[in-house]
């Protein structure tokens, strides 16, 4: 048994009543004897009915244990259902090396929303597989926020496996569908000049349509903001109507290589910020 599956089994055994754990353990043994597509699909389909959908609610120590096994593995948003299905799928992949892509594809073909989210959330635990990568690319094209965020939020897979092109378009799409950027692992580490240009262009489109620009957008622009991009930061700062935007833009400016940076930051000292935000004292 892999370290990840051993950990999943420990978590589930602590949380499940004895009869539910016995059912899961027996189902694992059955799949070890007969890991056919039919038996796999039956097991996956029965998990929520037999074990429920309660939140896993991992402790701080359990989160640390997860990260120690797979860097960036964060099951904060996992349910008991997710953990149990992960346990079953990894069992199958270990029983038949090289089968991860096939299992992932076949399970995804008829998956409902919860099943799709489960598959994408357990990506960090699966062996590298080109077929899995294709399914992830397809998942990114969805406009269903929950599925998109199962791939992008608290998941190390994009940081570790996406090339720059896929990474940049993932970040842009997150903004396009109003998904928050903060839970994306490696957001600062993977920031790049091309992405900064794409985001500034997107901000101009939003301004032209008189639509708001997410304060989070500027986080990926700051380190690459010089000349015209710095002018974009100044425009965002001058037209800011919220403290969140002002703070985000000032933070981006603080990281900018543009020589105007110091003068702008000095002008927006703490007293100036309080006045600009309509406060006093």
Image (spheres, rainbow, N blue to C red):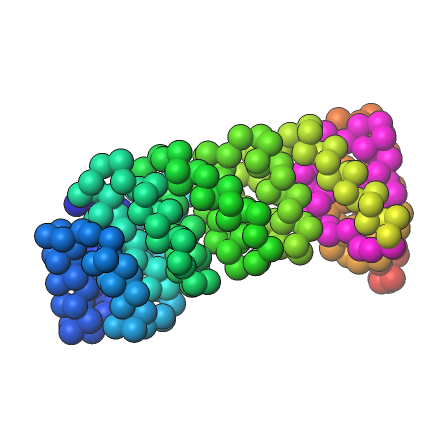
In the foreground, 280 or 151: 151
Q: Quadrant of the C terminus?
A: bottom right
Question: In the picture shown, does residue 213 fall above or below 101?
Answer: below
Question: In the picture shown, does residue 5 fall above or below 52?
Answer: above
Write the start and end of the magenta stretch as one range.
210-237
Report if residue 38 is visible in the image: yes
Could you say which quadrant of the image residue 242 lies in? bottom right
Is 221 a magenta residue? Answer: yes
Q: Residue at x 45, y 44 (%)?
A: 135
On screen, residue 208 versus residue 248, left or right, reads right
State whether the magenta stretch is mostly helix, strand or loop. helix
Q: Quadrant of the N terminus?
A: top left
Could you say which quadrant of the image residue 200 lies in? top right
Residue 187: percent from left, percent from top: 58, 40
Q: Residue at x 15, y 72 (%)?
A: 18
Q: Residue at x 73, y 36 (%)?
A: 198
Is 68 a magenta residue? Answer: no
Question: In the picture shown, does residue 15 fall above or below 98?
Answer: below
Residue 146: percent from left, percent from top: 53, 59
Report if residue 266 is visible in the image: no
Residue 150: percent from left, percent from top: 48, 53
Give the tally of numbered discs. 0
Residue 263: percent from left, percent from top: 86, 34
Q: Residue at x 26, y 48 (%)?
A: 90
In the foreground, 137 or 76: 137
């Amino acid at each position: 048994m892999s370290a990840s599956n051993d950990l999943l089994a420990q978590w589930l055994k602590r949380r499940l009543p004895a009869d539910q754990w016995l059912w899961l353990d027996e189902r694992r043994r059955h799949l070890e004897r007969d890991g056919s597509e039919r038996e796999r699909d039956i097991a996956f389909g029965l998990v929520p009915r037999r074990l429920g959908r309660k939140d896993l609610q991992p402790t701080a120590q359990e989160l640390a244990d997860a990260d120690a096994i797979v860097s960036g593995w964060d099951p904060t948003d996992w349910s008991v259902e997710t953990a149990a299905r992960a346990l079953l799928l990894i069992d199958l992949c270990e029983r038949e090396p090289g089968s991860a892509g096939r299992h992932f594809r076949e399970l995804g073909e008829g998956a409902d929303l919860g099943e799709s989210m489960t598959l994408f959330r357990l990506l960090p635990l699966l062996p590298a597989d080109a077929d899995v990568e294709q399914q992830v690319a397809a998942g990114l094209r969805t406009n269903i926020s929950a599925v998109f965020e199962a791939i992008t939020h608290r998941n190390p897979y994009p940081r570790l496996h996406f090339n720059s092109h896929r990474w940049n378009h993932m970040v842009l799409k997150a903004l396009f569908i109003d998904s928050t950027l903060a839970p994306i692992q490696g957001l600062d580490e993977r920031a790049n000049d091309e992405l900064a240009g794409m985001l500034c262009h997107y901000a101009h489109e939003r301004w032209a349509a008189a639509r708001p620009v997410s304060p989070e957008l500027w986080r990926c622009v700051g380190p690459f903001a010089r000349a015209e991009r710095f002018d974009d930061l100044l425009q965002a700062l001058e037209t800011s109507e919220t403290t969140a935007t002002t703070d985000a833009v000032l933070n981006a400016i603080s990281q900018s290589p543009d020589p105007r940076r110091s003068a702008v930051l000095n002008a927006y000292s703490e007293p100036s910020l309080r006045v600009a935000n309509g406060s006093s004292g």
